[in-house]
Image: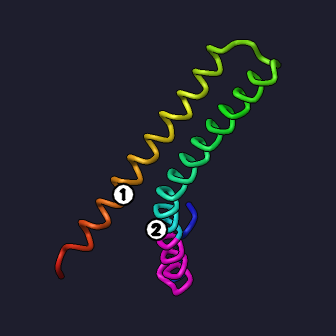
């Protein structure tokens, strides 16, 4: 069996490593929510761009399928409405937090 160096485990370096791991975990938690919002906004924007492209193709005659164009427009509209509702809920939560007294 291999002997474990207790002093090395309890040393200053291991404490700093532990703190660094904790800071990294906290940073990942913060960026998780930020990443979720950013990805959602990018997806809504992508759907809007796809709808715009579908409308342009329909207008120029490159695509004659009005059903696909309308579906793309509705997807973009629903995505935007959902994004706005999420924004409203975040603002409401922030305002509620700001109302609380310390």
27 to 72, vertically: above or below:
below
Provide residue 90's location: percent of width, then percent of height.
36, 57
13 to 54, vertically: above or below:
below
Question: What quarter of the picture does the N terminus occupy?
Answer: bottom right
Provide residue 14's location: percent of width, then percent of height.
53, 78
Chief secondary structure of the magenta portion: helix
Identify the secondary structure beneath mark 2.
helix
**How is the protein colored in the picture?**
rainbow
Residue tagged by mark 2?
26
Give the residue displayed 59% in from the left and 41% down from the top: 43
Question: What quarter of the picture does the C terminus occupy?
Answer: bottom left
Residue tagged by mark 1?
90
Provide residue 31's location: percent of width, then percent of height.
52, 61
Cα gap from disc 1 to disc 2, whole angstroms = 21 Å
Q: Is residue 21 magenta?
A: yes
Q: Residue furthest bottom?
A: 12
| CA neighbours of label 2 inside 10 A, class few (<14), some (14 to 19), many (20+) | few
Q: Is residue 80 left or right of residue 68?
A: left
Give the residue displayed 65% in from the left and 31% down from the top: 51
Identify the secondary structure beneath mark 1.
helix
Query: Magenta segment range?
Result: 9-23
Give the residue displayed 56% in from the left and 53% down from the top: 38
57 to 27, vertically: above or below:
above
Label 1 or label 2, whichever lies nearer to me, is 1
Provide residue 17's location: percent of width, then percent of height.
54, 76
In the picture, residue 100 is in which quadrant? bottom left
Disc 1 + disc 2, Cβ < 8 Å: no
Give the residue displayed 51% in from the left and 34% down from the top: 77
- Count of numbered badges drawn on the protein: 2
């Amino acid at each position: 069996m291999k002997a474990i160096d207790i002093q090395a485990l309890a040393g200053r370096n291991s404490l700093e490593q532990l703190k660094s791991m904790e800071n990294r975990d906290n940073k990942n938690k913060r960026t998780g929510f930020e990443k979720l919002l950013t990805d959602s906004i990018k997806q809504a924007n992508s759907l809007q761009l796809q709808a715009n492209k579908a409308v342009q193709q329909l207008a120029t005659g490159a695509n004659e399928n009005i059903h696909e164009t309308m579906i793309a427009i509705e997807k973009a509209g629903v995505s935007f409405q959902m994004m706005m509702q999420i924004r409203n809920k975040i603002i409401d939560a922030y305002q509620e937090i700001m109302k609380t007294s310390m």
